[in-house]
Image (spheres, grey):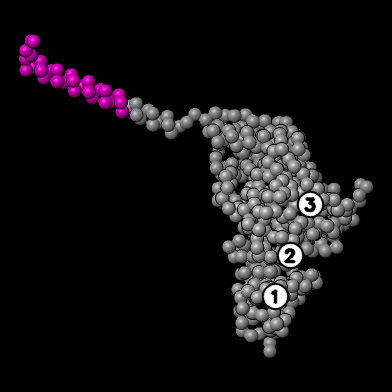
Amino acid sequence: MDKVVISVAQDFSDTPAGRYRADSPRSGQQFREDILLPALKRGERVEVDLNGTLGFGSSFLEEAFGGLVRHGLTAKDLHERLSIKSSIPIYVKRVWQYIDEEDARR
Amino acid sequence: MKRLSLSAKQRNLRLTLWGLRKRQKRALAGVRRRKKHANVKPRLRVDIVAPERFCIRRTVDRSKFISFLDAVESALGSGGRPRLNFSKVSELQPCGTLVFRARLDTWLHAYPARITCTYPKNDIVEQLFQHIGILELLGLQSRKAEITHDHVRDWHYHCGSRMDASIYRELTLSIRDRIDHPERALFADCLNEAVYNTVNHAYEFEAPGLPAPDQRKWWMFSQVKDGRLFVAIYDFGVSIPASLLRRPEWRDYARLRSRDGHLIEAAAASERTSTKLSHRGKGLPEMLEFSRKLRDGGLSIISRRGAFVFTAGSGHLQRRKYPVPLPGTLVLWEMPFLGRNDNG
């Protein structure tokens, strides 16, 4: 299976922030719906590179990644097909925390 | 009774008609005159002297400063043309200056071309007012060819109505690697979340005194001074205590602890979020968490009559109560830079 690499800074924005489209021009919802989810729905393995941005904010990360579970994907599937790359380990930890917490609520 | 001739009757009729027309003409002129005066109400110029210090944190200064803002608001509301006399202003704190800049935005939008001002006498005050656009907004030309004072050059002003981190990109870029913090990269995340908190919660319901819908913004100042970064974020919204009291899950807590300082502390320090969704409303808790690992500096959150102050280093938490309420919410964040010499 091919792996698609998505760079948030290059493919989306270097100033991602905020949860919803209505509140922010570079929101987590927009990233998930326009970039991340289409790649995952094609059944591909996806690596998301978080390097190169000027921060995120927990609202962006939660909506982008925790939102995947709210919109039908499972944590198990995501652990198999999604990988997160960042020079700041806490971002990687948070992404998986948001995914697993949302899955536990389902 | 004497019988009138036909010509006399005709003359009388002409006179009556002439009298009627004259009265009608006079009445119409009166209506026109009244309409004209109704459209141009006489507006009195009201001289309002600004206080020496623009400061929200210190109780005495805050009372004088907020009285000044109220006087301007009241003059505008009663149809006057306030002229702000800045001759006595000698100290501009980021907290007070940011609140003034925000109020000025909303006044100028609601009452265009009604406020004027005098030049400040203090050179640094004039430089700063020029630097952050206050003089220009109030119709005065910039007199300073360049901004020379170190404490002025490093003030930066941003404002927006949506969560757009590109607005303050330069600020984030210039300082994020310089903060003395073991996880300094997370500064940008906290800043984004603090601004997003404002976009999301500050104007979440209607309340008396809120600005017009297109003026519901966040305002930000940053200043680098003596090896430290100050960031102030203000919204003119419903305030943290009012916001919490509207939420059913907070009501019981709020009944027991009715003081604003307690409620602000709860919003910042509690695991409980302002909505039932556990992933919402984490802006203030994240700022506090980040501040706990600072060597010094701290975080202050001021809203309505209360304040919650965290002092980094000692870890001291304090609640404050003010006699005069501040509309909206003001967040003040202070942090040291790497390599800062504490003795110098």
Q: Chain of mark 1?
A: A
Q: Nearer the viewer, mark 1 or mark 3?
A: 1
On screen, residue B14 above or below A4: above
Q: Residue at x 6, y 17 (%)?
A: B6
Instruction: Quadrant for the N terminus of chain A, please.
Output: bottom right
Name the residue beneath numbered marker 1.
Answer: A104
Tell me if mark 2 has few (under 14), some (14-19) or many (20+) residues whose alpha carbon lies within 10 angstroms of its own: many
Q: Which residue bears the numbered disc 3?
A: B299
Disc 2 versus disc 3: distance between alpha carbons? 20 Å
Residue A55: mark in rendering: 2
- Residue B36 in the image: state x and y as whole percent: 40, 31
The reply, left or right, for residue B25 in relation to residue B176 is left
Read off the magenta span: B1-28
Residue B27 in the image: above or below residue B293:
above
Relative depth, front residue between B251 and B211: B251
Residue farthest along the right direction in this orientation = B343
> Is the residue at mark 2 from the same chain as the one at mark 3?
no
Q: Amino acid at mark 3?
A: Leu
The span from disc 1 to disc 2 (Cα, nearest Å) is 27 Å
Verify CB contact (< 8 Å) between mark 1 and mark 3.
no
- Depth order, front residue of B191/B150: B191
- From mark 1 to mark 3, how far is it between C-alphas? 34 Å
Asked if residue B124 shows in the view, the reply is no
Residue positioned 78% across, 47% down in the render: B319
Whole-percent x and y of residue B56? Answer: 73, 41
Name the residue type under label 1: Ala
On the picture, is B76 further left or further right than B319? left
